Image (cartoon, rainbow, N blue to C red):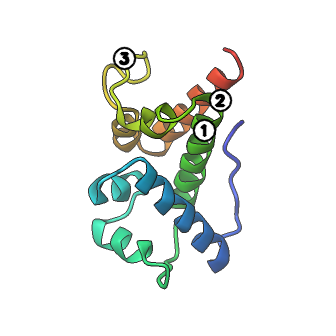
Amino acid sequence: MPVVATTSRSPSTVAVALKAYARIANAWQLSVKEAAALADMSESTWKRTKKTAHSTALTQDQMLRLSAVIGIYKALGLYFSEPLSSVWMVRENHGPLFGGKRPVDTAIAGGLPAIINVRTYLDALRGGA
């Protein structure tokens, strides 16, 4: 399923996206540095946004990143059972897309295009490709 760009960035939409992303970062046991980089934020901004009382305006790129990561998390839950679904992003992967790196490192290094590639890869697995 492709990532759909949304122009709605109301404070409530941003708050929901950030809350979901914080739960995912926690489930994957990402460090503050990794979670911030994956969302394209500074570490200090990520620390502030993790707090439920604080919300921040996000760029279109950041919202697309969060949307794609949420899609990755959902796809992992549909395709793999626990505990693999919780550790897949942070384990070395020797598939052609990752070259022995962790999928999360590939996503961080490649930015939004790489995050979308990971999501597309998982969607193809779910589709039987």
Give, as a three-letter code, the residue at label 1: Gly
Q: Which residue is mark 2?
A: 123
What's under tag 2, amino acid-wise? Answer: Asp
Q: Is residue 126 visible?
A: yes
Q: Secondary structure at mark 1?
A: helix
Q: Residues within 10 Å of mark 1 (few under 14, many from 20)?
A: some
Callout count: 3
Give the number of the mark in front: 1 or 2.
1
Q: Looking at the picture, tell me which residue is in the foreground, 75 or 46.
A: 75
Quarter-wise, where is residue 36 in the image?
A: bottom left
Rendered view: 63 above or below 96:
below
Of residues 26 and 65, the one nearer the viewer is 26
Closer to the camera, 20 or 44?
20
Q: Earlier in the sequence, mark 3 or mark 1?
A: 1
The residue type indicated by label 3 comes to His
| Residue depicted at 50% across the width and 79% down the height | 55
Identify the image quadrant of the C terminus: top right
User: Residue beneath label 3, please?
Assistant: 94
Q: Which residue is mark 1?
A: 77
Marks 3 and 2 sit apart, C-alpha to C-alpha, by 18 Å
For residue 97, which numbered disc appears in the image? none
Q: Is residue 30 left or right of residue 24?
A: left
